[in-house]
Image (spheres, coloured by chain):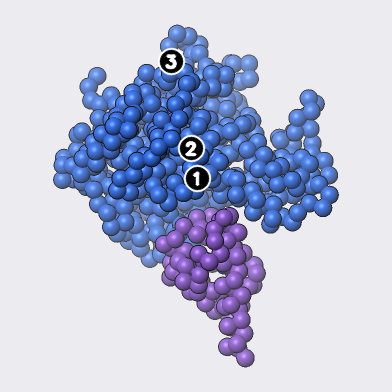
Amino acid sequence: MVERHDIETRDAAREAIRAFILGRNPGLSPDSITAQTSLVTSDALDSIGVLDLMMELGERFGFEIEEDAFALAHFESIDALAAYVATKRAQA
Amino acid sequence: MSGPTHVHQLLAGPADDRIALVAGDERLTYSAFRDRVTALSTRLVEAGLARGDRVAVLLPKSIGECVALFAIAQAGAAFVPIHPSLRPSQVRHIVEDCGARILVTEPALRSILGDTLAVSAETAAESILLTLPDWDGPSPPEDLAAILYTSGSTGLPKGVMLSHANLIAGTRIVRTYLGITPEERILSVLPLAFDYGLNQLLTTVEQGACLVLLDVRFGDEVVRAIETHRITGLAGVPTLWTLLTRAAPRLAKADLSSLRYITNSGGGVPRETVARLRQALPHTRIVLMYGLTEAFRSTWLPPEELDARPGSMGRAIPETEIFAVTADGRRTRPGETGILMHRGPTVSLGYWNRPDETAKVLVPDPLAPLGPPLCRSGDLVIEDAEGYFTFVGRDDAMIKTSGFRVSPGEVEAALMATGAFSAVAVIGLPDPSLGQRLHAVGIPVPNSPPLDAILRAVRESVAPHMVPRTVETVSALPVTPNGKVDYKRLVAERPNG
């Protein structure tokens, strides 16, 4: 059951990240943001947008945002960030 | 006097094979830089550019943007760099307000503008030159080099006119007090549409040094760039120091011993952030500076004074006199609050095509009424007995957030356009990361749309830095005796938001 819970969190996080990005980019086609979209190499969010996204994920999924949360590896795809959220949530 | 008198002449000096610019995997020598500038300058002239024309530049932070600015200067015109995060209607305001003859842009950015602006387009390699309708306004000042758009306390952004002499003086002054040499490798994270971002490009070229261009989203990207390129100098606004000290796990592990100095401008840095920077960068000189676009830089705090003068914005930069005056025009006594006044070679030529606004900011020098004017900053400061200044606040409602100046009126107009409010006021509240953060106080109409729908609509019309961070609803706004919104009271009643 733990695994299934993980997958649900990951799916919810992925949707939350996509919704956040689309909210910050009016006019952007929803199809252009996929699970593989990188936040490092795309213009999806600026630096303040990244900070805001992490605050929102921390609040919504109930974990503390610490410095390590901002390792570049977490932002190489939306999937990677969703997986990180699921891990933190499981630890919280 | 010898040496360059015009911005593009700075490019003549450096040796051919030195690296001038680095962006990602791209490297440009000074020789190739000169060739690209000359080629684009020729294209501009062939497209009909004449001396005194304005050329708007809408490009991402790139080698192409640096080339465009020098090419425009070489063609005898004035460049108008536009921040690429601005929304289409904001870009259109700048292009139309400055009466640009040509807009230099690229395919991806051109598409967001639509086809309404251009008369004709010429595309080559990565850049597009859009020729714009003729402008029949007054002629520009003789020595005009650049127009930088910035907000005031009211109205739409205004263009600050900078002469070649202003830009050359700013280059010489900053290079002198920071001790910039040809061996410098400077990391450029600020937009070239900011005066200090532009100044980094010019000081680099003047010294034949190397500028590494970086679009920053993550603190670790900055850390990696410093390591990879052995960066010696870095300039930022308060947001950058937050990214580095709170959101850069690599900072503690990296070897950043190459970093000789960092400089801050565009808002105060909280003392705690300064302390974290000192701890993480024990060998780096931390230089706090203050300035406004209308006069470029005014004060700097020498790094050896940082501990002795916490909260200080420093003393006058070289070649410059800074002092404060009271409301009745008398020079302040030590410890007394007054408006910061600036006398020196970086005082701008005023606002493009707005003589009345210019007259409020550029005032006759009482010591030399026929000479160059003084800049009246609108910033309230206190000077101590040793000539060091402390920032107190603004004497108007202008907001400074994340290094950008924001006019409350422009954000209020975007909020009112959503139809959600019968009245709204936008103020700046203290914020450790942003300097100030935008807070909207509004009277909602009945059945007003939900907050996220309101903010989505605002994001469509203004750049990200102009979107309120928080929105508060009230039943009435405080007003002054003459019936205007009382911004000072709104701020005072919300000391920490």
- Give the class, few, some or many, for how many residues have Cα within 10 Å of label 3's Cα (few <14, many ≥20): some
Distance between mark 3 and mark 1 Cα atoms: 42 Å
Total marks in image? 3
Residue B183 visible in the current orientation: no
Q: Residue at x 33, y 25 (%)?
A: B50
- Horizontal side of residue B471 vs A19, given as left or right: right
Q: Residue B387 versus residue A29: which sits nearer the camera?
A: A29
Label 1: element kind: loop
Q: Earlier in the sequence, mark 3 or mark 2?
A: 2
State whether residue A34 is above or below residue B212. Answer: below
At which x and y percent is residue B77? 35, 27
Which residue position holds label 1? B114
Identify the residue position indicated by label 3 in the image: B372
What shade does chain B have?
blue
Under circle 2, the secondary element is loop
Please state which amino acid type lies under the numbered disc 3. Pro
Q: Quadrant of residue B46?
A: top left
Farthest residue to the bottom: give it: A1
Chain in purple in the render = A
The crowd level at tag 1 (other Cα within 10 Å; few <14, some 14-19, many 20+) is: few
Q: CA distance from mark 2 to mark 1?
A: 8 Å
Q: Would you say the residues marked 2 and 1 are in contact, meaning their CB atoms lie under 8 Å apart?
A: yes
The alpha-carbon separation of the residues under discs 3 and 2 comes to 37 Å
Which chain hosts label 1? B
Determine which of the numbered discs, if any, sits on residue B117 in the image. 2
Circle nearer the viewer, 3 or 2 = 2
Tag 3, which chain? B
Q: Earlier in the sequence, mark 3 or mark 1?
A: 1
Say whether mark 2 and mark 3 are on the same chain. yes
The picture places residue B173, in percent across and down from the top left corner, at 34, 30
